[in-house]
Image (cartoon, rainbow, N blue to C red):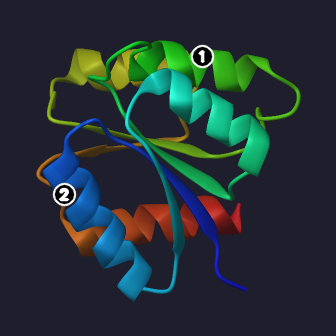
């Protein structure tokens, strides 16, 4: 069965490129272009994994992660934060918000796939 991945990313180029690459790797990708849509789709679609950008319009990735991890219906879904902010403080803040893993942009697909597969197996 193809894992359902929710990709929450506001940058159209990043979103299109990553969703295409993940689809080729056998994932079914649902996309949201802002944090609120990400929350709504996570509740509605119950994806197997969420890839969450942090710098999002409407609701940022930190807040969207906190909200999803606070809800009984979505708290079990692993969230991997994707960010261009590679500072240790950003990573610490992402983990405090409840994310399960953290990856930096630009995306290195093999590294991200390893993190995704580890999260999906947990």
Q: Would you identify the image quadrant in which residue 60 lies?
A: top left
Disc 2 to disc 1, how far (Cα)? 23 Å
**Left or right side of 53 for 74:** right
**Nearest to the observer: residue 23 or residue 89:** 23
Q: Is residue 23 above or below residue 112?
A: below
x 32%, y 18%: residue:
57
Q: Which mark is residue 10?
A: none
Name the residue at 65% across, 16% down.
Answer: 67
Quadrant of res 41: top right
Give the structural element (helix, strand or loop) at label 1.
Answer: helix
- In the depicted structure, whether residue 118 falls above or below residue 84: below
Measuring 71% from the left and 60% from the top, which residue is drawn there? Answer: 122
Give the mark nearer the N terminus: 2 vs 1: 1
Q: Residues within 10 Å of mark 2 (few under 14, many from 20)?
A: some
Looking at the picture, tell me which residue is in the foreground, 45 or 73: 45
Left or right relative to 11: residue 50: right
Image position of 98 (left or right of 15): right
Q: Residue 23: horizontal and vertical position, in percent?
A: 42, 79
Residue position marked by numbered label 2 in the rendering: 107
Q: Residue at (21%, 65%) from the top-left corner? A: 17
Residue 101 lies, in percent from the top left, at 46, 43
Q: Quadrant of residue 25?
A: bottom left
Q: Which mark is residue 66?
A: 1
Characterize the local packing of mark 1: few (<14), some (14-19) or many (20 or more) Cα atoms within 10 angstroms.
some
Quadrant occupied by the N terminus: bottom right
């Amino acid at each position: 069965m193809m894992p359902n991945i929710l990709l929450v990313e506001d940058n159209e180029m990043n979103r299109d490129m990553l969703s295409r690459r993940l689809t080729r790797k056998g994932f079914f990708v649902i996309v949201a272009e802002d944090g609120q849509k990400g929350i709504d789709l996570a509740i509605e679609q119950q994806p197997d994994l969420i890839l969450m950008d942090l710098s999002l319009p409407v609701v940022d990735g930190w807040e969207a992660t906190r909200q999803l991890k606070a809800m009984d219906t979505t708290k079990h879904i692993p969230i991997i934060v994707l960010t261009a902010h590679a500072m240790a403080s950003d990573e610490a803040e992402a983990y405090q918000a409840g994310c399960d893993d953290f990856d930096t942009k630009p995306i290195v697909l093999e590294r991200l796939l390893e993190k995704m597969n580890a999260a999906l197996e947990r």
